[in-house]
Amino acid sequence: MISITLNGREQSFDVEADMPLLWLIREEAGLRGTKFGCGIAQCGACTVHVDGQAVRSCMYPAVAAQDKQVNTVETLGSKDAPHALQTAWIKHQVPQCGYCQSGMMMAAAALLQNNANPSGEDIDVAMTNICRCGTYSRVKAAILDAAKEISS
Amino acid sequence: MSMTRRMFVFGGAAIGGGLALGVIGLGTHLAVHDRLAVQREGNGKDTLLNLWLRVNQDNTVTLLSPHTEMGQGAGTGLTQIVADELDLNWDQIKLELAPPSTEFSNGGVFEGFIGEMIGKAPKWAEHIASNAFNRLADVLNMQMTGGSASIRFTGWNIMREAAAAARQMLINAAIDKHSASANTSTDSGFVVDGDNRWSYGELVEHAATLAVPEDYVLRSPSDRKFIGKAMPRHDLPDKVFLKTQYGIDRYVDGMRYAAIAHSGVFGADVASIDNLDEIIAMRGVLAVEKMGLSVAVIADNPWRAEKAVKALKITAASHENSDISSASIESFQRQSLQGELSDAHAVGDVTSVQDGTGETIEAEFWVPYLAHATMEPMNASAWMEGNKLHVAAGVQNPLYVRAHAAKIADMDIENVVFHAHSMGGGFGRRVGFSMSEDNPIMWIDEVVTLVKKYQFPIKLTWSREADTRQDVYRPAILANFSAQLDENGKPSYWKSASYGSEGGAPAAMTPYNIGNVQVQFANHPSPIPVGFWRSVENSQHAFFNESFIDILAEKAQTDPIAYRLSLLNKDDDHAKCLTEVAKLCNWQHGVSDDGKAMGVAVQKSFGTMVATVAEVSLQNNKARVHRVWVVTDSGVVVNPDSATAQIEGGIMFGLTAALYGRCDIENGGVKQSNFHDYPIVKMTEAPIVKVKLLQSDNIPGGFGEVGVPTIAPAVANALAVLGKRLTRLPINA
């Protein structure tokens, strides 16, 4: 049994130690905002926060999250109470197909937690997620905007 | 309305109140597919386009689309067009996607809408009804991702036809019911006659009793409030707040999960599973199924299924493709280009000048196979409910897939329900047919076969590796070019030959004024599955043609933009965009003090002219693209922000192909497997892209694909200025 605090709620899962956190989240917990893209931690579509740090859950063994706080994109915000990143994502019309964007926003949220005022270069270094639709310039503009919003 | 438009508007009272209008057009609109000799299931050459509008009693208007979001925001553009033609406020128009319920998603969408809105299809429409879903998909596809000019033309008109007819019916209702005057007009959701104002909602019941007018007129461009504005996309809030359900997110109770291994050789069956007992014993594994070209493992969790698939030891049946490699394909293509060729385009007589005295300039180009690599890998879910088979997936043409699933299941199409989901990227991958007549939607066959046998619900997901190795690829193409320059440095002839039937497409023709041109191609069946890849043949041929003209400019020691302009008429739209892009980027030919150089390319595709300049440097002998400038000329631009986003995205897509994209063939299969060896441009390598959209009153050009073709030649041409002329892609091989 693996016990984690998933989105604020302590839960136990009867899964193998090497099951990646992604599949525990998507299938055992039924939270499907976190996406599968590559399975080898290259694309970042599966990004979640473990104890506040961005991890690529497709290669992160569930057992490594034992007794830790795991937050998925479902905790980011809602239409009624949006995260500043979500507001900026809409303002800059970031998504195209949208599939990579929950991972993008989670990577960006972790970045802003660690660095409230990132430069464009900081963003380049931190945001290594793949977007096949090529929305990078808008992602960057939206992060800069959200950072300004949060710090004001 | 004029019959020459070959369209019919019909309508009546909507069930549940309101006025419903549909438009049907017959004709041969599918030039893009006909050109590539792709036969569609259905009624052959008769193309049906339809669009549904419902004017509601609550004074709103619903644009009904039976297609799910395809990624490029066309739905928003459609509502902009309708809102203008119907004279609405923005908050009055709603885009409604057909819900994935049985009634709508069983593919009988045409009948479904008719049933919901006006009760019964007109007799004449019945025989084509079954094709309606496909055709509307084409309209949407066109609006979002390009498509041929004829499709776009019809789409642009057809949407306005229904809205214009509806507006006229509302005016006629005011005249008929309230004795309004002949000067009656509309104003943002109201019919207005002097001081009298009636909301559309008030008039809609009466309007629904009137005949559809034949004398409506389309509104003038000066009446537009939304076309040409950056209206926010309807689908983005759902994407940002996780309401969008992609195919991979489908879940039904009792679902089991399948993962797939293919034989590893295109066309070859799996001959044997060599460690079946070991696989069956793995945790969660429920079944292992050999299905011709593939093996499926079914388990209680997708990761367990995939883990078992990765542990599978399989042997491919011997097959004639087993020995093929990229090298053997390239050498076969080279040999083919020496053999009998088909003529595509000809101007003047190349043979009459070929033996001239000038230096003959020759170049051989090569582009590799490319996978689509959509972010969401191929997947589908299927389950039985009573005697009905349900299939859920994100695909570009749901009715085709529904018909295909029925064929695989050996069931009547009426007993197959298709649930269309949003797609995590398409780029041509999720079309049901391919250029080589290989089946691009094998995952549908696989899941249907499994559900038929096991009866429980199954979601089948291809791993990234399966997705990369079992694609319908952008074709690998070898091309030969030759030319001779006259005493003024202008080509006295231009000769090209390329491999593949796309060599016959207009994209293969040089746009420059050259007295003698011969464009030819060789074509033989492809051993590797090839399909539609964002911008189709334009991505290869723009690289060939725009690199070669640059080589000639280099030989003529002339500025590459000036050289191109000297071979174009002043009023040509290539010249217009080249001139504009030169201004936009402050064009400099040569190496800058900090080691950068600019390269240019121009290509018209899908009705849109695109001129692109890339600023490139060499860092550790690898190309680094700093800035990109793009000028487009595309007639009416419905939504400039969406259009800009599509160009930005197209540049990134094309840049990935230019810098990194290659699928190498080894032993009959693709060597690359995932993003570590099939890399995608990331943010840190993404250039700054500046886009300028030139507009006119001409019919709208496409945007989804047109950003792709020019970036590879623009980068290659910049590298040539830095001393590195590359005629083979990818650049950073």
Image (cartoon, coloured by chain):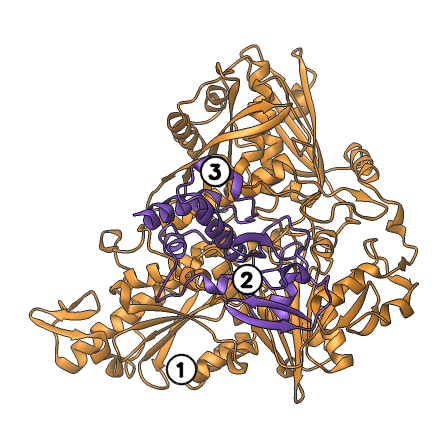
Chain colours: A purple, B orange
Residue B169 in the image: state x and y as whole percent: 26, 74
Whether residue B699 is visible, yes or no, is no
Number of residues whose C-alpha sits closer than 10 Å to that of mark 1, classed few (under 14), some (14–19) or many (20 or more): many
| SS for dot 3 | helix
In the displayed structure, does residue A4 sit left or right of residue B238? right
Q: Nearer the viewer, residue B501 or B68?
A: B68
Residue B337, by quadrant, is: top right
Where does the C terminus of chain B fall, quadrant-wise? top right
Reading the image, the residue beneath label 3 is A122
Q: Disc 1 is attached to a residue of which chain?
A: B
Q: Disc 3 is attached to a residue of which chain?
A: A
Label 1 sits on what residue type? Met
Number of residues whose C-alpha sits closer than 10 Å to that of mark 3, classed few (under 14), some (14–19) or many (20 or more): few
Label 3 sits on what residue type? Asp
Residue B672 in the image: state x and y as whole percent: 74, 45
Where does the N terminus of chain B fall, quadrant-wise? bottom left
Q: Nearer the viewer, residue B702 or A54?
A: A54
Which numbered dot is residue A69? 2
Reading the image, the residue beneath label 1 is B117
